[in-house]
Image (tube, helix red, strand yellow):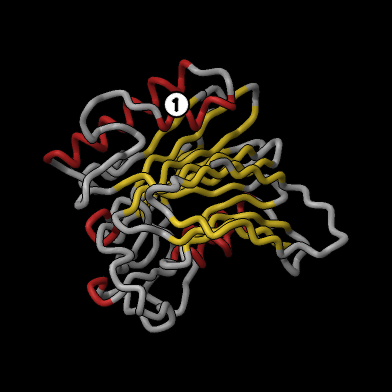
Amino acid sequence: MKLITIFNQITQTLINECVIAYINLDGKNILCKNRDRLYTPDIKIIHELLDNGIEICYMYDEITDYSEGINSNGLAIVNSALLVKDDEKEGKDKSIDITKINPDNTETGIKGYDGLKIRTALSANNLKEALRSILIYQGKDKKDVGVKGFTMVSTPKNTYIIEATSQDLPIVTKIKPKTKVAIRTNHGIHHPQSGYLKGPKRVSSLSRYNFSKENLEKNNDENEILNILSKKYTHNFNNPYRRGGKEDMTTTSQLKMNSNDLTFDFRPDSKNSNFIGYENRLPKEYQPKIKVNIYD
């Protein structure tokens, strides 16, 4: 089932390039991500209880304000870019204030509004509210509507993929119940003119897609998912886990979230990211519903 939602033409913002994956094992919905950056991110995990009673846990990039995570209802969100040119500029100037950035001119800043948009969606009470938020949320810049790129939104029962650019209508696809694996990298599926279109980066996007899908479909062990996404399948740059040079995107962390078991597993790459730590903002007497695992 596909739903096309109409929204205004807008400028594209800074999102994340990467590999994102949906896996269904034993009836449980799992979202994963290899996050690739051109800069060295300062990352921490934030775990907090919102005023509406919803508990959330998310990765937070202090340089770009970007976030992805899960809430206590099992609603999990990950994203991968289609606007890869702007994404490759991200993180170059730490002096820019997120409240002053002009998304129309990505040369002048590094921070976007997508972190706030995703955190807002994580505060939703249900899947319908979260999808609506991902599609139409407006930040301080009224032209910057919704989250761009591929966004996977999962709950214990259902998972959707949103494919959105500023040049096309967003397409929302419900993943069929019998689907074991769904992968998105950085080339358009319903919008084939988006993302990497040709050359080595197109080859890399397709290669990362195929390696991830083929090997995750063979796997039946949740504990092996991040290992599968970090293996070296070829001697060049076209692996799901990117071990790049100075001018290439490099994988800086891995994330896995189980909507049914309410687990949040995070694995930073110590060579390519600065992991600040786990920030527990929960009330002292509160018993967390989300289990957090951080691996070296």
Graded by Cα atoms within 10 Å as few (under 14), some (14 to 19) or many (20 or more), the crowding at tag 1 reads some
Viewer-proximal residue among 137 and 28 = 28
Q: Quadrant of residue 99?
A: bottom left
- Asked if residue 164 shows in the view, the reply is yes
**Judging from the image, what secondary structure is the residue with disc 1 in?**
helix
In the rendered image, the vertical position of residue 235 relative to residue 243, given as above or below: above
In the displayed structure image, the side of residue 88 where residue 117 appears, left or right: right
Residue 197 in the image: x percent, y percent?
17, 43
In the displayed structure image, the side of residue 40 where residue 135 appears, left or right: right
Residue 76 in the image: x percent, y percent?
59, 47
- Asked if residue 129 shows in the view, the reply is no
Residue 216 in the image: x percent, y percent?
45, 23
Q: Quadrant of residue 98?
A: bottom left
In the rendered image, the vertical position of residue 165 relative to residue 255, given as above or below: below
In the rendered image, the vertical position of residue 249 relative to residue 142, given as above or below: above
- Residue pictured at 47% horizontal, 67% vertical: 62
Residue 20 in the image: x percent, y percent?
43, 40
Task: Report the quarter where the C terminus lies.
Answer: top right
Viewer-proximal residue among 127 and 100 = 100
Q: Quadrant of residue 207?
A: top left
Provide the residue designation for mark 1. 228
- Residue pictured at 33% horizontal, 27% vertical: 232
